[in-house]
Image (cartoon, grey):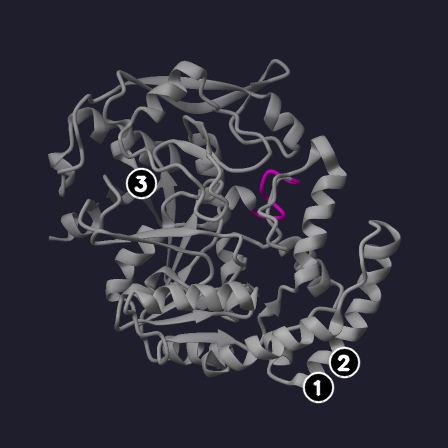
Amino acid sequence: MPGIIVVGLQWGDEGKGKVVDLLSVHSSHIVRSMGGSNAGHTIKVGDRECGLHLIPSGIFQPHAHCYIAGGCLVDPKSLIEEIDQIEKMGIVLGPRLHLSLSAHLILPFHRTLDRLYEEKKKGKAIGTTGRGIGPCMSDRANRIGLRIADLLSPERLKDKLETLASIKNLELENIFGQSPINVEEITRDYIAYGEKLAPFVVDVEGRINRALTRDETVLFEGAHGTLLDGIYGSYPFVTSSSTLTGGVCAGAGVGPTRINEAIGVLKAYTTRVGGGPLPTTVNDDELSQFQSVAEFRELGTTTGRQRRIGWLDLVLARYAVELNGVSSISLTKLDILDDFDEISVCTGYHLNGKKLDRPPSLAEDLERVEPIYEKMPGWKTSTRGARKLRALPKRAQEFIEKVEDFCRIPVSMVSVGPDREETIHIDQEWAR
């Protein structure tokens, strides 16, 4: 199966990085095709952890070629810092990391505008990462943005930057009272960034399509999560990219017929960072149970913010499965529920006296829904040592079956800890 997509089925932070890292063992090419440094994946390799933001998680597999495709937004300074971080770990990137000419550039004033927009919203701020993603996407849609291709041509870069700055200064100076953009300084810095990134720049989309034609395995790494999709997520509390499987294809320059399998990553409970509704938010007593877990691991990789916690919401999970057309689920962080006496699972909503089996379109309504919970008994024993499905406690197996029955697709993988080895490959188990 040459074309495989991995996407998150919640609000991000589902554990996609570990899933991609595991699948990368059998993949020749790993592709990131949407979002920017606002995404974050934490990979644990042996006793080391590394937080990645733009470079695909498969970079730790020495045989794999990794691609940052045209649908991505690149902050060159951040990318260079990420490259330096990985190279200091002894990972050779030169011949394996590839950057698309079509990827758009995040510029310093994009980050400034991101912050100013949030401040202007006051109590209605959505809680962005402040990385300049939205303003950069806005420039891309308005056809005034700059791309990696411009970064490699100093004269073209300065000319286009002057035009863009003349537009942005109207907003920065007249609306927000900020100083005008220093075109000379940005040009100087970005020419230097271009010189450092030039060795990585290739025809990414051409290489990906040729690899697929040769039937080589290409793994597409989704960023963020389905419920942050700019169209079908909890709008306006969403990201600027399309986070669905369709968005992955578009950002990589690959047609949907080239994809053979799509895997959805689902955490055994729900989290989100930033503003917006979280229908299954736990109460204080329940939250203390989660936080008492020794390796709770719920700080955002990108922001360092504490994630909000909720019970598993199967209404949203099934909605995400439908939007993405995923063929199986990778269930992560099952071990976090090991010590709970009772586990709640949301199987429906009440809103204005009516029962809903799909999320409402308005975020204001999703904020007001009353979850309908099914209570399941906990298994009260560690799952960390399990490597086969039948080694899990019976009640943990029943929890997995509940996910499968409600979402109408199988669970193919279960993560019971952060290490690579702490994984149950159910699909391989049945294949044997």
Please indicate whether residue 315 sits to the left or right of residue 59 in the image: right
Horizontal relation, residue 294 to residue 102: left or right: left
Residue 73 is situated, as x and y percent measured from the top left of the image, at 58, 63
Tell me the tag on residue 332: 3
Which SS does the magenta portion mostly show? loop
Disc 3 packing (10 Å; few <14; some 14–19; many ≥20) = many
Q: Give the range drawn in magenta.
A: 229-236
Of callouts 1 and 3, which one flags the residue occurring earlier in the amino acid sequence?
1
State if disc 3 and disc 1 touch (CB < 8 Å): no
The secondary structure type at the circle numbered 2 is: helix
**Circle 1 residue:** 155
Q: In which quarter of the image is residue 14?
A: top left
Q: Are marks 1 and 2 in contact (CB under 8 Å)?
A: yes
Q: Is 352 above or below relative to 318?
A: above
Q: What residue type is labelled 2?
A: Asp
- Label 2 with label 3: CB-CB less than 8 Å: no
Of the numbered discs in the image, which one, if any, rests on residue 223?
none
Q: Position of residue 137 (x, y in %)?
A: 66, 59
Q: Does residue 242 belong to the magenta stretch? A: no
Q: Mark 2 points at which residue?
A: 159
